[in-house]
């Protein structure tokens, strides 16, 4: 801090809200002009912690050294490669256009209403890139342009995807089964080129940033851990075959012409940085634990530096023998990653994640080399008002923006050093920049793929993203990029001398011979695993058949039971109806009988009455005084 105070203070810009380059000319990004970033030869000594492995997380900033200290002529200059990728959208905005040479993006404010209230964003701007991929450019071409050659020449690199939420960062790195992204293609490329030299045992490992020869016990522990973790990973099934077909159709990966004595050992590591804490995405989980990802307390890891090597203390690295194994680990890690839904992206990565692939090569001469590939998917840079974030989402977004801002400041500081304007890069202000410092210092190739959603809605945010990219594009590292770190090996704490190298050689030769046996054991275990899998499959098929048979029998029994019950009920019902009918019939018959008799009696009575009346009438007619009356009556 003292050194910083000694320098004239200059305004610290944020890439999130940068000063308009066209207004403030002091800080104007000059895409066409390359500046030099001088890196001192003894830069590692600038780290305060020594070989005791103390944490680097101390106050202060990392000094890159004065320019005059290494101005040796003839050194190779190399800079960050910054590509722009425009994601396909339904209605692309005319606010973005690509120059004729295909390397410059021209932006114009979309319209009066939607343009910035901010004056600085209301004019045309031009951003130059190492290459621009419009929405028609395929995953294959992105890989070929940005990565392919680096793997072929075994050059260590860090690739970053950067952009607003939902702009296609994850798609560019991972893709899907039919449009595999940069990572699956890189893995296929790496394993294709070393196929015959892959060493079958984890005899060498990067431990605490140093290549270490593992003794038998450690190697067998690594093997057990490897099998345990791989067994816990989901199978890729058809996805891998589809992905591999696409990749094989798209590229011709040629095996490297390596001597058969060269042994290649490949390790993968996968971490996420969430809310400024580093989590291990490959740490084995206890299968008996019923806790879910959300309730399990994840251990956060410490970033440490030892003799200038930055590493994550206690992180899980897994020895891999094929791209399929690596992809299974990647998929298992992705399942532990922190995603959430924002109003912009339903499946938005809320953390930065880094997938490391370390290739260790052992030569018969005793030289051991390391090539390191880092694939970093940055969480989306976002304006808090656009994403509609609240509560913990808001906190996450603030953390994401802070670490991206530090990344921007590191790039900016690195950029300024060449002009003699500064001498410190604030790596330690964020976990992300601590882990990426090799690339930010030019020790590894830095490739940035900037993803942009070319719509009016994102205009202002895209300008921030593009300004950030312009800063990265300006950096030129004068020190040559270290293609491979060679011979940094040790046996846990001891510095090897020549005798020791000889011992190592003998040990590795012995390991090679012993290897057959171990291979055989592993193969036997794998065979057993396959047999057990087949047995499980056979038993589960048999079980399913038996279940189906029992179900069929039960169904038939049930149908028969219902049929019988229905028949009995029908009969009972008919009988009851019949008896009811008969009793009704009897009632009606007796009633009819009764009425019949009643009416017959009445009829009889009436007849008798008539007879009586007739008799009476006759009697009256017979009487003499009644003759007239009788005539009248007649
Ligand atoms: N070039 C592309 N071609 C086809 N689809 C794409 C492309 N880029 C992005 N997409 C699609 O857009 C959606 C969002 O992309 P993605 O998840 O990669 O965004 P992101 O930048 O990683 O977002 P976040 O930062 O929020 O995680 C996905 O469904 C993805 O398939």
Image (cartoon, rainbow, N blue to C red):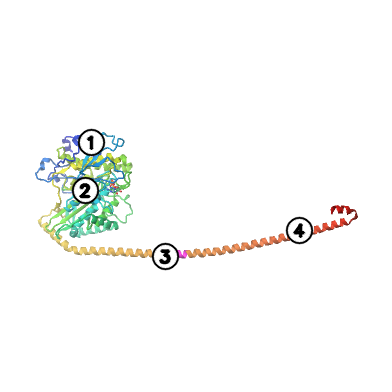
Q: Is label 4 or label 3 in front?
A: 4
Q: Label 1 vs label 3: CA separation?
A: 77 Å
Residue shown at 50%/63% (left/top)?
562
Residue 622 visible somewhere in the drawing: yes
Residue nearest the observer in this picture, 218 or 232: 232
The disc, 4 or 3, on the residue closer to the chain's N-terminal end is 3
The disc, 2 or 4, on the residue closer to the chain's N-terminal end is 2
Element on which disc 1 rests: loop
Q: Is label 1 or label 3 in front?
A: 1
Residue extent of the magenta highlight: 547-558
| In the rendered image, the vertical position of residue 2 relative to residue 627, given as above or below | above
Residue 492 visible somewhere in the drawing: no
Whether the residue carrying mark 1 lies under 8 Å from ligand 1 is answered with no
Residue shown at 90%/53% (left/top)?
625
Residue wearing tag 2: 159
The disc, 3 or 2, on the residue closer to the chain's N-terminal end is 2
Q: Label 4 vs label 3: CA separation?
A: 77 Å
Residue 600, image quadrant: bottom right
The disc, 1 or 4, on the residue closer to the chain's N-terminal end is 1
Residue 248, image quadrant: bottom left
Image location (x, y in percent) of residue 458: 29, 41
Residue wearing tag 3: 550
For label 1, count other residues whose C-alpha is less than 10 Å away and answer few (under 14), some (14-19) or many (20+).
many
Residue nearest the observer in this picture, 509 or 329: 329
For label 3, count other residues whose C-alpha is less than 10 Å away and answer few (under 14), some (14-19) or many (20+).
few
Residue wearing tag 1: 20
- Is residue 234 rendered to the left or right of residue 218? right
The label shown at residue 602 is 4
- Picture quarter with the C terminus: bottom right
Q: Label 3 vs label 2: CA separation?
A: 58 Å
Q: Label 2 vs label 4: CA separation?
A: 121 Å
């Amino acid at each position: 801090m003292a050194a910083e105070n000694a320098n004239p203070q200059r305004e610290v810009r944020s890439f999130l809200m940068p000063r308009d380059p066209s207004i403030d000319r002091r800080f104007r990004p000059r895409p066409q002009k390359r500046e030099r970033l001088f890196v001192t030869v003894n830069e590692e000594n600038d780290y305060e912690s020594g070989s005791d492995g103390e944490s680097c997380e101390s106050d202060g900033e990392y000094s890159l050294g004065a320019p005059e200290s290494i101005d040796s002529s003839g050194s190779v200059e190399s800079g960050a490669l910054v590509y722009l990728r425009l994601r396909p959208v339904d209605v692309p905005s005319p606010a973005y256009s690509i120059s004729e040479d295909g390397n410059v993006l021209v932006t114009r404010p979309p319209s009066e209403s939607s343009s910035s209230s901010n004056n600085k964003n209301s004019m045309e701007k031009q951003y130059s890139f190492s290459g621009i991929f419009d929405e028609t450019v395929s995953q294959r071409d992105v890989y070929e342009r940005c990565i392919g050659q680096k793997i072929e020449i075994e050059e260590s690199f860090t690739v970053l995807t950067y952009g607003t939420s939902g702009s296609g960062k994850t798609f560019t790195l991972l893709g899907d089964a039919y449009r595999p992204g940069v990572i699956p293609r890189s893995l296929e490329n790496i394993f294709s080129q070393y196929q015959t030299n892959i060493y079958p045992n984890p005899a060498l490992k990067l431990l605490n940033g140093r290549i270490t020869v593992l003794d038998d016990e450690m190697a067998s522990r690594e093997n057990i851990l490897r099998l345990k973790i791989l067994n816990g990973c989901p199978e890729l099934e058809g996805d891998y075959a589809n992905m591999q077909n696409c990749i094989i159709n798209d590229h011709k990966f040629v095996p490297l012409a390596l001597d058969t004595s060269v042994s290649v050992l490949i390790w993968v590591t996968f971490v996420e940085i969430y809310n400024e804490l580093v989590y291990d995405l490959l740490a084995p989980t206890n299968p008996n634990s019923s806790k879910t990802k959300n309730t399990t307390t994840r251990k956060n890891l410490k970033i440490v530096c030892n003799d200038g090597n930055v590493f994550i203390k206690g992180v899980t690295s897994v020895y891999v023998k094929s791209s399929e194994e690596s992809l299974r680990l990647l998929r298992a890690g992705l399942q532990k990653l922190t995603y959430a839904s924002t109003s912009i992206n339903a499946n938005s990565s809320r953390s930065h994640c880094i997938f490391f692939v370390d290739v260790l090569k052992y030569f018969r001469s005793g030289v051991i080399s390391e090539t390191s590939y880092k694939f970093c998917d940055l969480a989306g840079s976002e304006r808090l008002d656009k994403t509609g974030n609240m509560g913990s989402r808001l906190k996450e977004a603030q953390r994401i923006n802070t670490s991206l801002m530090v990344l921007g400041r590191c790039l900016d500081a690195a950029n300024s050093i060449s002009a003699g304007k500064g001498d410190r890069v604030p790596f330690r202000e964020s976990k992300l920049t601590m882990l990426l410092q090799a690339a930010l210092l030019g020790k590894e190739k830095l490739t940035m793929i900037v993803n942009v959603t070319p719509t009016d809605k994102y205009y202002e945010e895209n300008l921030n993203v593009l300004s950030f990219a312009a800063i990265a594009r300006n950096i030129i590292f004068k020190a040559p990029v270290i293609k491979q770190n060679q011979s940094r090996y040790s046996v846990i704490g001891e510095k090897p001398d020549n005798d020791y190298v000889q011992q190592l050689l003998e040990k590795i030769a012995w390991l090679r011979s012993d290897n057959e046996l171990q291979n055989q054991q592993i193969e036997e275990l794998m065979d057993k695993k396959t047999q057990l899998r087949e047995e499980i499959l056979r038993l589960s098929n048999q079980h399913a058949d038996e279940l189906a048979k029992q179900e069929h029998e039960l169904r038939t029994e049930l149908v028969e039971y219902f049929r019988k019950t229905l028949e009995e009920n029908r009969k009972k019902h008919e009988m009851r109806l019949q008896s009811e009918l008969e009793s009704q019939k009897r009632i009606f018959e007796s009633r009819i009988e009764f009425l019949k008799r009643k009416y017959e009696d009445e009829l009889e009575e009436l007849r008798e009455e008539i007879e009586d009346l007739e008799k009476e009438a006759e009697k009256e007619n017979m009487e003499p005084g009644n003759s007239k009356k009788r005539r009248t009556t007649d």
